Amino acid sequence: MTTNPTTLTATPGTPFADTVREFDATPEQVFRAQTDPDLVAHWLGPRKLEMTVLEYDVRPGGSYRYIPRDPASGTEYRFRGVFHTVEKSVLIIQTFEWESASGQVSLESSRFEDLGGRTRLIGHSVFPSVEARDAMVDNGMERGIVDSMNRLDELIAVHAG
């Protein structure tokens, strides 16, 4: 069980969503869990979904593609994007596209703020429109992010120990 809450702020009328979560781990540990494809497959997405990471090449110009799958219904949710900026343990800037909403590409940044042995992960997503952001929120964005951050926290605790 985690003691660090995840906050998602999606101010009405704006195309932005901001996420903040603190981890009891160093920026290096959080960054590794966010960039190692083998680790990403264990925390990204809601807990009830099975994750297949097809590609996860974390470098400027590298791309990613993954498929969370609901084992009960067989429903797949396909996502892809491109990494633009990667500064180890400091910053990742990437695009994000839900393939079911093709052409609705968002720009995401993840900042790893060093809190002296702990890390504050700050995410900022810029959607192409308010409507696109609202559609993601309406399709379970907050539930997916909170569950992912809880799973990431659990994974880091196991690998840091």
Image (cartoon, rainbow, N blue to C red):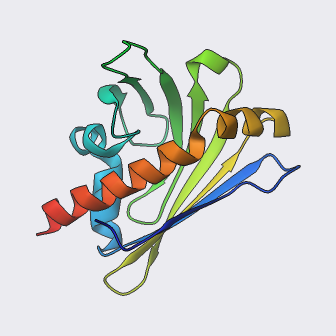
Q: Residue at x 32, y 55 (%)?
A: 152
Q: Residue at x 15, y 60 (%)?
A: 159
Q: Residue at x 35, y 79 (%)?
A: 118
Horizontal side, residue 92 vs residue 160: left or right: right
Q: Can you say whether 86 is above or below 2 in the image?
A: above
State which quarter of the image contains the C terminus: bottom left
Q: Residue furthest left?
A: 161
Q: Can you say whether 114 is above or below 147 in the image?
A: below
State which quarter of the image contains the N terminus: bottom left
| Image coords of residue 137 (percent x, y) | 67, 40
| Image coords of residue 57 (percent x, y) | 36, 35
Q: Can you say whether 65 is above or below 117 in the image?
A: above
| Image coords of residue 11 (percent x, y) | 79, 57
All told, the count of numbered labels is 0
Front-most of 73 and 88? 73
Q: Residue furthest top?
A: 74
Q: Residue at x 76, y 38 (%)?
A: 134
Q: Quadrant of residue 23?
A: bottom left
Q: Quadrant of residue 32?
A: bottom left
Q: Residue furthest front?
A: 72
| Image coords of residue 111 (percent x, y) | 52, 64
Q: Residue furthest right?
A: 13
Q: Can you say whether 23 is above or below 69 in the image?
A: below
Front-most of 29 and 98? 98
